[in-house]
Image (cartoon, rainbow, N blue to C red):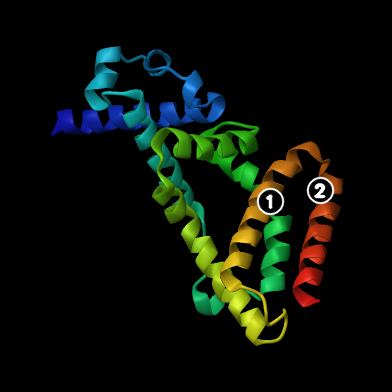
Amino acid sequence: MMADTKSERTRELLVAEALRQFLMSGYENVSLHQISEATNLSKGALTYHFDSKKVLFQAAVEYFFDTLETKRTLPESAELPPLRTYLEMSFRGIPQISELLASIFGIHDTSMNYHRLLLDVIQVLGDYELLHRYFSPALQSLHTMISRAREDGQIREDIDVSSLAHQILATIEGSYVIQFYIKSDDFERTAASMVENLWRGLRS
């Protein structure tokens, strides 16, 4: 039993350190040797748990998404805010995403790291299903809010709900990158303008 517990702790240590390095440097720039050195474990101990870098990357990515999933608090369908309110909250809260990732994973400049990791998931693992699983709850919530806004006459009747849900999510993700080269005060104004421009397009 003790061996199993120690084995699990070793595995968790390796996964956490691997994720930190993959986030900071990207998949291609990280080696198993670097991870074993950082954890003070032998290469043999590492390969006992993960027989390749790709397998370790898969475990690190799953840990990343599972951890974020526990931190994400999407309300139940009945408690979702109006679409306009959600947009304002989402764009205004973008800088907090960086703070959240930094506090969880202990690294800064997380926007580029985060999006590089998403690209590595596709390029290394070819796992679109993993990304779909991660973004699916947000898309489902957006789908519900857009449908309600259309039914209530807040936005145009000819709006395609599914396409708009993906468009809004992509805009929010892109805005996460923009914040890093716009000063905080300017970003607040820019975010407010983005919401206003988007809303005008949905209303006209």
Element carrying mark 1: helix
203 lies above or below 177: below
Mark 2 neighbour class, 10 Å CA radius: few under 14, some 14 to 19, many 20 or more:
many
Quarter occupied by residue 60:
top left
Rendering coords of residue 4 (x, y %) = 17, 32
User: Does residue 73 appear to the left or right of 44 in the view shown?
Assistant: right
Q: Residue at x 45, y 41 (%)?
A: 64
130 in relation to 85, above or below: above
Give the quadrant of the N terminus.
Answer: top left
Q: Residue 173, image x and y in percent?
A: 64, 50
**Count of residue discs:** 2
Cα gap from disc 2 to disc 1, whole angstroms: 10 Å
Q: Position of residue 68 (x, y in %)?
A: 48, 48
Amino acid type indicated by mark 2: Phe
On screen, 21 above or below 117?
A: above
Q: Position of residue 65 (x, y in %)?
A: 44, 46
* Dot label at residue 94: 1
Q: Nearer the viewer, residue 106 or 89?
A: 89
Residue at (81, 76) in percent of width and height: 204
Residue linked to disc 2? 187
Callout 2–callout 1 Cβ contact below 8 Å: yes
Q: Quadrant of the rendered structure where residue 132 is?
A: bottom left
Q: Residue at x 48, y 62 (%)?
A: 137
Q: Could you tell whether 199 is left or right of 144 in the image? A: right
Write the residue at 71% across / 49% down: 175
Q: Residues within 10 Å of mark 1 (few under 14, many from 20)?
A: many
As helix, strand or loop, the secondary structure at mark 2 comes to: helix
